[in-house]
Amino acid sequence: MIRNPYMPQEAEILKIFQETDINYTFRLKTDLKVKSGQFLEVSIPRIGEAPISVSDFGDGYLDLTIRKVGRVTQALHNLQPGDKFFIRGPYGNGFPIDKLKDRRLIVAAGGTGLAPVKSLINQYYNDSLEIKSLQLLAGFKSPGDILFSSELEKWSKKFPVEITVDRGSENWKGRVGLVTKLVADLDISEVENTMVIVVGPPLMMKFTTQEFVKKKISIGNIYLSFERKMSCGIGKCGHCKIDDTYVCLEGPVFEYSKAIQLLD
Amino acid sequence: MGYKIYREKFADLFHELRASYEIYAPVTKKDKGMYSDTDLITYDKVESFTEIVFDKKTFFSPKEIVFPIRQTLFYFTEDSVLEPTKLEKDIVIFARACDINSFRSLDAIFLQNGPYEDPYYKKLRQRVKFILLPCDGFENCYCACLGTNITDNYSAYVDVRDDAVYCKVKDAYWKGLWSKYGEESEVEPRYVSKNENTFEIPQKINNSIFEHQMWSEYTNRCTGCGRCTVVCPTCTCFTVHDIRYDDNSKYGERRRVWASCQIDGFTEMAGGHGYRHKQGERTRFRVLHKISDFKKRFGFQMCVGCGRCEDACQEYISLKNCIHKISEIMAEEEKV
Ligand SMILES: Cc1cc2nc3c(=O)[nH]c(=O)nc-3n(C[C@H](O)[C@H](O)[C@H](O)COP(=O)(O)OP(=O)(O)OC[C@H]3O[C@@H](n4cnc5c(N)ncnc54)[C@H](O)[C@@H]3O)c2cc1C
Ligand code: FES
């Protein structure tokens, strides 16, 4: 009997952290070995399956930060610690850790795009990522949409963290404007030695990347994480295909020089 | 080894074959055609040799036999996830060279693409033996332009002429059966060597084609019905859905269902964001997959030139005309 790659494994919810009104982080008990930037297919029998990025991981657990938008994500949000749901994976390539080594890294994240890079940032925070420096630029719709607030707070004590929101509120004292503006205002030293990761909604990625290019960052030094409709995660269903590339197999992380060749 | 077998004898041979195999072949379904009062020629399980239609192209391809329109991946009970276990007989498919060649494309996606083999496909596929049919070509075909007019991948070849059936048997396991009913004879498969439609498949397609105005014509003509992908022998896209049974909501299934890049929702994600909203863009995506993208990945063309997409299109959109147009545009670019 050949192994069935569609067969999901049951995993128990250890903890649930509320991030915002509609984003919750689920900590699962599992020994699955994952890399930053990879994703799982998450499912609830009789409801459905959805691709979700691994937002963090450690000994015996991994985190998924899930936004409530439809059938599966809604059903997941009804679960409690001790309940179980199904996972299979990990899938995708993840971030190119070897290419980041000893470089300066700038991460630009939009909204839930912060989830797939969170584990990478935490590795740096915990001194287990060998890079020279890290700077985080994060944009959210409004102050109420800010993810991982306590981590952002913690990180900002160790390295530069800039947060901006599209729309402020009465109590918001921080920046208002798009992530692209944060990039425009950057003063990047050692341009050749700087690597960039951009993750977020399609338009945010497009304009943010262009802004970095204006800053003379080489297109070979910029990485993007793509989001596409996916129905299998293993190169069979065809939904994620662009040109001769399958986002679930060769991505979701692409070097920008490759990404600009991938025309929809 | 070649054989000549009289029709009545071949019916007996067929009967014996049917005891060990499920046999699929082109058949006629009365009044089920695309237009009123027309018959549908399609693949189906056959019980007798006389049901088989030897002189017409099927509307649907044989891919359904190994990649069902709707396929259960798992059965869910209250606390378990079960794989379907039904064991069936081996399968024999009567097919022309183009259709046998289309299985190479199916194999590439289901067995080679990515790190895993698709177990549902493999289970059906490994049971398949082909009986090759001769072909003289049909309307809208262009297999010879793609080299899919010939194949070596068959267990036997069967050519029904007048009162006898001329066969060639390659599968050692079948030689005994054939020699029991027929007399030895020189038989070689008959293939199409030149189609009515002959043109060059472009070797290299530049990204400039993405912006070309040629696609706007398809935005105007294509209605996005998806028939072209349904009848295509090499389209393999699917979507996975879960269902719960109406009579007991604790039970249900995870299924895959054929999907089409021509139909709304193929790329749509949560939040309503999607790609390729215009039908022209979807046509471009389909056409380039068939004659370029797939080849870059697997080294051979996905399209087998059967022309079914054109046969099925109610707007008379022709893949061969589209390919021809791309060739001209690329040749024009070369000159500049
Ligand atoms: C690689 C990858 C990583 C991801 N990582 C994360 C992550 O870390 N966290 C996270 O929250 N999400 C992530 N996503 C997105 C997540 O997969 C989707 O939000 C999820 O699939 C939604 O599933 P659902 O069943 O809840 O929603 P569905 O019920 O499928 O749909 C949700 C909404 O989307 C719209 N929609 C969906 N399909 C269609 C359609 N066919 N036609 C029209 N509208 C449609 C509808 O408005 C619907 O209300 C990731 C996606 C990918 C590809
Ligand atoms: S998600 Fe199915 S092929 Fe990539």
Image (spheres, coloured by chain):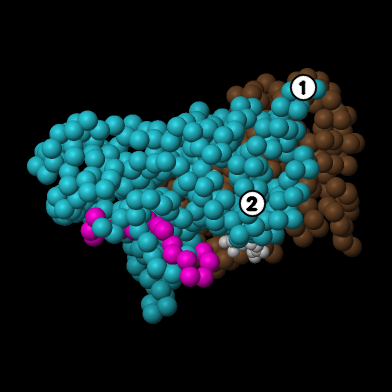
Chain colours: A brown, B cyan
Q: Residues within 10 Å of mark 1 (few under 14, many from 20)?
A: few
Residue shown at 46% from the left, 55% from the top: B59
**Quarter of the view holding residue A216:** top right
- Nearest to the observer: residue A147 or residue B31: B31
> Looking at the image, which residue is at 42% across and 41% down?
B136
**Residue B335: numbered disc:** 1
Q: Is residue A141 left or right of residue B266?
A: right
Please give the range of residues in magenta.
B34-49
Would residue A141 be found to the left or right of residue A56 on screen? right
Can residue A105 be spotted in the picture?
no
Figure quadrant of residue B323:
top right
Q: Chain of mark 1?
A: B
Q: Which residue is mark 2?
A: B317
Mark sitting on residue B255: none
**SS of the residue under disc 1:** helix
Q: Residue furthest front?
A: B162
Please name the residue shown 82% across and 30% down the image: A213
**x and y, in percent, of residue A190 in the image:** 81, 20
Q: Quadrant of the C terminus of chain A?
A: top right
The three-letter amino acid code for the residue at tag 1 is: Lys
Sequence order check: which comes first, mark 1 or mark 2?
2
Using the image, name the chain to which the residue with label 2 belongs. B
Q: Is residue A229 above or below residue B106?
A: below
Q: Give how far across and how far down residue A255 sits, in percent.
A: 67, 30
